Every structure is written in C-alpha cells, then in structure tokens.
Amino acid sequence: MSTNSMSRRRFLQSTGAAALWLPTAVKGHTSNEMQALFVDGVMQEDVSKWELDTPALCVDLDVLEANIAKMQSTTARNGIASRPHAKTHKTPIIAQMQLDSGSVGICSAKVSEAEAMFQHGIEQILMTTTNVTPTKIRRAMNLRESCEGFIQATDSPDNARLLSAAAESMGIVADIVVDIDPGGHRTGITPGQPALQLAQLIDSLPGLRLRGLLCYDGGSQHVKGFEQRKNQTLERLVAASGTYDLFQQSGLSTEIFSGGGTGTYNIDHETRGLTDIQVGSYVFMDAQYIDIGGESDNEAYDDFGPSLTILATVLNAQYEGRATTDAGAKSCTINRPWPVVKGETGMSYTSGSDEFGSLRYEDNASRSYEVGDKLELIVSHCDPVVNLYNQMYAIRDDRVEAIWPIAARGMSA
Ligand SMILES: Cc1ncc(COP(=O)(O)O)c(C=O)c1O
C-alpha cells in the first residue's frame, strides 16, 4: 500500500470509531417519536444516535463547529471574508451559525432557497444564479422588496434590463453583481469589455444598483493535488481580476468580488481584489472532497472534518463477503466516489440500488456486521444528500442534541 493511501486510510479511521456509546436495548426511534421528544429546542430524553430509526441524516456538532471556526480563522488571517453557500446545507440554523462566526452573508442557488432562508431570519443573501423567467424575476424582486440584504447576480444586458424594469415597477432599487465566466462557459459573461459594458449598463439603469462582481470557478474546486488546483484556479481568475481593475478604473463599484469554494479556500485570497469566498461543502465535507488531497496531505483533504453522516441498518448478512443495508440511492444518491463506512477499514460500500446499500468485505476487514447492526456512512457528495432529508439530527458525543429542519429541502426552483 502506498504512503498516500495509508494516510487516507488513517484519516478516515481517525474520523471516529463506529460506536462509542451503544445502549443495550436499541430502540429505533422514528422521526415522529424524536420530534415528540424535542420540546422547545431541548431533547427531553437522552437518545443515542445508534437508537435512531434509519436511514437517518446526522451532523456531528463538534466537527461542524470546528469546520466553521477553521474557515473563519483562515479567511480572517488571509484578509478576506466568507459568504457561505446555503445550497449545501439548506438549513437556516447552520446559516445563522456561519453568520454568527463572522460570515458577511450567505449565498443561495435558487430563488425558493433564498425565500426559505429569509423566512427563517437570514437577511444577507447573495443569489449566485441568474433568474431569467418573468416569474422568477418577479419573485426575486419581491424578495428584494422585503429583504434589503438581497443581492442578485446577472450575466447579460437583456437580463439586467428585465431586472431593472421589474424593480422599477415595484418602486425599489435592486442590488446587483455581475457574474463573470471563469472559462467553463456554464454561467456568467465573458470577462473584460463585455463584463465592463454590462456593469456600465447596470450602473445606468434606474431600477438597479451595481455592487460588484462574482466569479465562481467550479471547474477548479475538485482538481486533485494542491499545487495543480492552486495553479489552475489562480490562472483562471486572472481575467476576473482584470475585470475588477476595469470596474475600478471606470469608477464602478467593486465592493463585492465574490468567488471560490471549499477546494480553493486557502488559495482564493491570492486573486487580486477578491473580497469573499462562497464556500459550501466545508461545513459537512464528503468523499468527493476528501479525495482531492490538501496542502499538507496530498492524498486526503483533511483541512475540514466529515461532519455529515448517514446511519444505516444491516438487513441481510447471510452471504459470504457481504451485507445489505437499508441505505441505497434514495438515501445516499448514486454520486461517486461511493460513501465511506466511517471508522472502518477493509470494506467498501455501494448505494447504486434504490432501497439497498451493499457492503463488501475485503480479506482484511476489521469486523463484519450482523442483521440489525448499524453503521455510519460518510456521504459521497453532501449537497444532493441533504436535499433527500427533511431534517438532520444534531449529535454531540453520540447523543442527539437537537433536530434541525432542512427548511430549504426540495427548494430547487
Ligand atoms: C456558485 C457557487 N458558489 C459556491 C459553491 C460552493 O462550492 P463548494 O461546495 O465547493 O465550497 C458552489 C457549488 O457548487 C456554487 O455553485
């Protein structure tokens, strides 16, 4: 085994043994039973996470809090801010924790997600996706009317005119950033003169107020190897920095220059002008991110800990070399790499079938599971997994401390 894969294994093992505290009579509390025990924000009984009915989505509070604190201290040291993306957690309680730690606001991917956040008390929201239909433009401007901290991204002159007309008809002036394409051509306008002309148009339209620009380089976030990732993203953001310069030279607002994500959180401050990073996955982490490697460990990206897990129960253990669980595609998605069994070595997990997960033992598996046993999975890709659940259990020292509604779950429009 290579040193690298040994270090990845060590990291995954160190993320916690499978069971720290297991009561003798495992109850399997259903979601309704758990809700009944959670009164006025306080659990009325000690419930171990191992007593939860499964599949259940859990977040480890110590790890989550450490991730948020680390992001805050790193951005502060690097002289930038964080504006975490709520598309990852869709959970207002987590958004509030991020704001309380010093984040300047949150981002949203969908207007319905932004509405849900605002309804739950989050008031600084940057919508990073352009709204193009009359319905969505109206919804975004309606939200802006009641939420002064709402900022909308746009990437075309036609869209800017529509936004301005909608804002004007409602008697408001909407805050806008220009979305710049980092080269992937997914969203955004071409940097340089096209972006400058759009910014000048926004600045001249009566219903809009220019606040700056954003450039999210999604194509660099999962590049394996720190140096490769760093070189790629810094190179791809040169054009956005040049556009920032053009805005400044033209007397346009550059109050916001937002970009970056979890994979480049400790690189993005080197991009001239960048004010804040739109980090999402760092709160939870997942197998996709662990695989990219970090600055200090090229094999396992361990800057942040995996706080989000799915609890699963073994349904069948009667066949050699394998076991079947109750957490398949509908609980874990079919993203790759597959989920990782937390605290175990010598086994792999696949969640390709709708209702069932499949556990396979290698020759050196440290243990095998019996029917009714529970196991914990580090998720494959956190964002889509969260969107499968109505609530997550907030766990400390293996006990359920709270139940958090995923208020923007399913808010994909
Ligand atoms: C526009 C935008 N910003 C930020 C993020 C957060 O990225 P990450 O989860 O890699 O931190 C995403 C994720 O896809 C995104 O689409």
Image: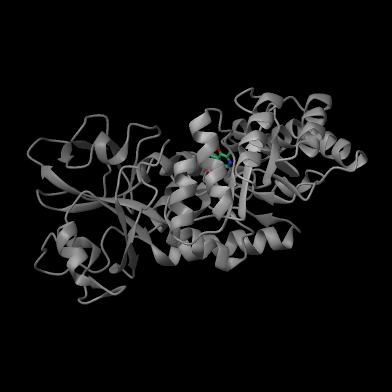
Q: How many numbered discs, if any? A: 0
Left or right: 311 as drawn, with respect to 152: left
Left or right, residue 253 beside residue 227: right
Kindly tell me whether residue 23 is visible in this rendering.
yes
How are the colours assigned in the image? one colour
For ligand 1, which image quadrant applies?
top right
**108 over 155 or under it: above or below:** below
Task: Between residue 73 and residue 172, name the one nearer to us.
Answer: 172
Residue at 46 percent of width and 60 percent of height: 94
Q: Does residue 127 sit above or below 47 in this rendering?
A: above
Q: Position of residue 134 (x, y in %)?
A: 53, 29
Which residue sits at x=64%, y=24%?
Answer: 184
Which residue is found at the position 22% from the left and 68% from the top?
48
Q: For residue 363, say whether it is visible.
A: no
Which residue is pictured at 92% across the width and 40% down the height?
Answer: 249
Q: Quadrant of the C terminus?
A: top left
Quarter-of-image position of residue 37: bottom left
Residue 246, horizontal then vertical, whole percent = 88, 35
